[in-house]
Amino acid sequence: METMSTTDVRHGDPVTTVLTWEVRPGREQEFERWTLGITRCARRFPGNEGVSWLRPEDGHRFHAVLRWSDAHRLTAWLESDERAAWHARIDDIATELGSERQSTTGLETWFSLPGTTVRPPVRWKMVLTTFLGAFPCTLLIQWLVAPHTAAWPLPLRAAVFPVVLLPVLTYLVMPLLSRLLRRWLYPPPDH
């Protein structure tokens, strides 16, 4: 049985799905061999952008993280004969517990989502918030760091900027802006 908890997936946006499997004790090696085959099959399917398996240290739950170019192609895979045939091979080995589907743009990791089922901010708000965070940092780097690296070779000088900027944005600035602008980024549903 497959249950699907779906956030608002916009047409054409990349989609990530996490599938959870409960493997019968003692059948883990068979299941892992099966994962290699279904992964190869999924990767050949149109729109697949990658499959990763998370194996438990203890216990019998495995998770597959599938990335697709859009929701339509993901649905085509989930309903495909190929996937059904692979599932039939492990009826007595494991049970699929369900899945969760989420639309992603890649910038969401900079925004603290107040729950897993909350729709990410609209893109123009993410762009504006990112600009508000990046501009002061860029100005500081250009003022404080760039003069000291002027004699360095161009590739090395160019590497300094993202090496300094990205961790500062990811760990300090964007989480702070996300908290400060939460009401604007995530307005209540009635607005």
Image (cartoon, rainbow, N blue to C red):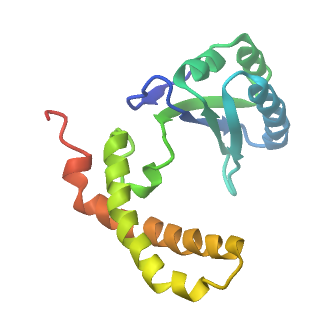
Q: Residue furthest bottom?
A: 148
Side (left or right) of 31 relative to 146? right
Identify which residue, 134 or 179, lies in the foreground.
Answer: 134
Query: Where residue 78 sits in the image (x, y, percent)?
Result: 62, 19
Give the quarter of the figure containing the N terminus. top right
Tell me which residue sits at (35%, 71%) in the image.
136
Up the image or down, 91 lies above or below 99; here it is above
* Residue 74 picture location, percent across and down: 59, 23
Within the image, what quadrant is residue 161 found in? Answer: bottom right
**Camera-side residue of 68 and 99:** 68
Say if 150 sits above or below 35 in the image: below
Q: Residue lying farthest top?
A: 81
Left or right: 152 as drawn, with respect to 30 = left
Q: Position of residue 122 (x, y in %)?
A: 33, 39
Which residue is at 43% across, 82% downward?
Answer: 143
Count of numbered labels shown in the rendering: 0
Residue 134 vs residue 91: left or right?
A: left
Q: Furthest residue to the front?
A: 151
Q: Residue at x 48, y 39 (%)?
A: 104
Can see residue 120? no
